[in-house]
Image (cartoon, grey):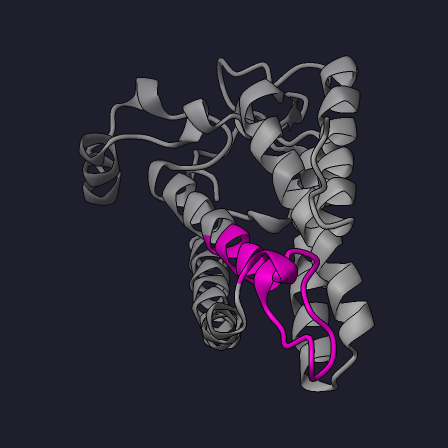
């Protein structure tokens, strides 16, 4: 979510807000979460497991990108302290603090959603019953009773994620009613110009390749049951 900003001069150029990899990751979450629900509801366990591993890889990439990506992707740019969040909610945040990217409260909303998805996919890795269908790739590392407990939590915790998604959509609708379009920049990567803001600059493709490789490698390692590396 971004800060509501004033209408810029029509002659100015749009500014780049979101890099391509962050946008691909964002929209992938939108597709994968419903897919995870559908595969579970219809007992498509093999597809559920593969989709969960893809989600794991995307989450690991997003965590890495939060440290090595462009400005608006970095946690340091949007995870702010309580004082700035309260000032934003009261409308007293200074003009100097206004920036492209997530607002202070939007940053915490994003962090909560990422954290919830990470908890959910982590539980899925250990969930299942080896005597009654598909199990997660790390299920053999825990006992049957522990796996049963994790499975129940995994099924229930999905609704926490659904609730957070609902809040996210409500916030987007709220800002849209106020005239601040948050969806279009997440599609195109650009937003109308902001006085004094040049945008995020070029995507660091070298760091991107490293983050993608590490995330994919980690997901593949987990898929094989996290065997010892040495």
Q: Could you say where residue 142 lies in the image, as x and y percent from the top left?
A: 54, 60
Front-most of residues 121 and 144: 144
Residue 184 lies, in percent from the top left, at 66, 46
Quadrant location of residue 210? Answer: top right
**Residue drawn at (79%, 79%) of the image:** 44
Which residue sits at x=66%, y=26%? 14
Count of marks placed on residues: 0
Q: Is 93 included in the stretch rendered in magenta?
A: no
Depth check: 183 or 130 in front? 130
**Magenta-drawn stretch contains 120:** yes
Rendered residue at 74%/86% (across/down): 42
Coordinates of residue 2 in the picture (x, y in percent)? 47, 39
Q: Can you tell which quarter of the image residue 149 is in?
A: bottom left
In this picture, which residue range is highlighted in magenta? 116-142
Camera-side residue of 10 and 2: 2
Q: Is residue 74 left or right of residue 212?
A: left
Q: Quadrant of residue 32?
A: bottom right
Where residue 163 appears, x then y in whole percent? 44, 69
Can residue 133 be seen?
A: yes
């Amino acid at each position: 979510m971004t800060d509501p900003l004033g209408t810029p001069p029509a002659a100015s150029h749009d500014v780049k807000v979101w890099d391509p990899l962050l946008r691909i990751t964002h929209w992938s979450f939108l597709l994968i979460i419903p897919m995870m629900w559908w595969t579970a509801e219809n007992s498509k366990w093999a597809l559920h497991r593969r989709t969960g591993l893809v989600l794991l890889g995307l989450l690991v990439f997003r965590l890495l990108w939060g440290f090595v990506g462009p400005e608006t992707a970095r946690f340091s740019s949007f995870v702010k302290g309580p004082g700035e969040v309260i000032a934003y909610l009261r409308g007293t945040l200074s003009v100097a603090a206004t920036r492209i990217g997530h607002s202070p409260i939007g940053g915490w909303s994003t962090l909560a959603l990422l954290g919830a998805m990470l908890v959910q996919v982590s539980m899925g890795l250990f969930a299942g019953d080896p005597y009654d269908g598909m199990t997660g790739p790390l299920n053999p590392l825990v006992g049957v009773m522990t796996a049963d407990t994790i499975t129940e939590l995994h099924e229930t915790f999905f609704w926490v994620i659904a609730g957070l998604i609902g809040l996210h959509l409500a916030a987007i609708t709220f800002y849209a009613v106020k005239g601040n379009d948050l969806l279009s920049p997440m599609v195109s990567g650009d937003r109308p110009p902001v006085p004094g803001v040049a945008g995020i600059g070029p995507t660091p493709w070298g760091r991107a390749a490293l983050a993608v490789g590490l995330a994919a490698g980690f997901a593949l390692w987990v898929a094989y049951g996290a065997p010892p590396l040495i």
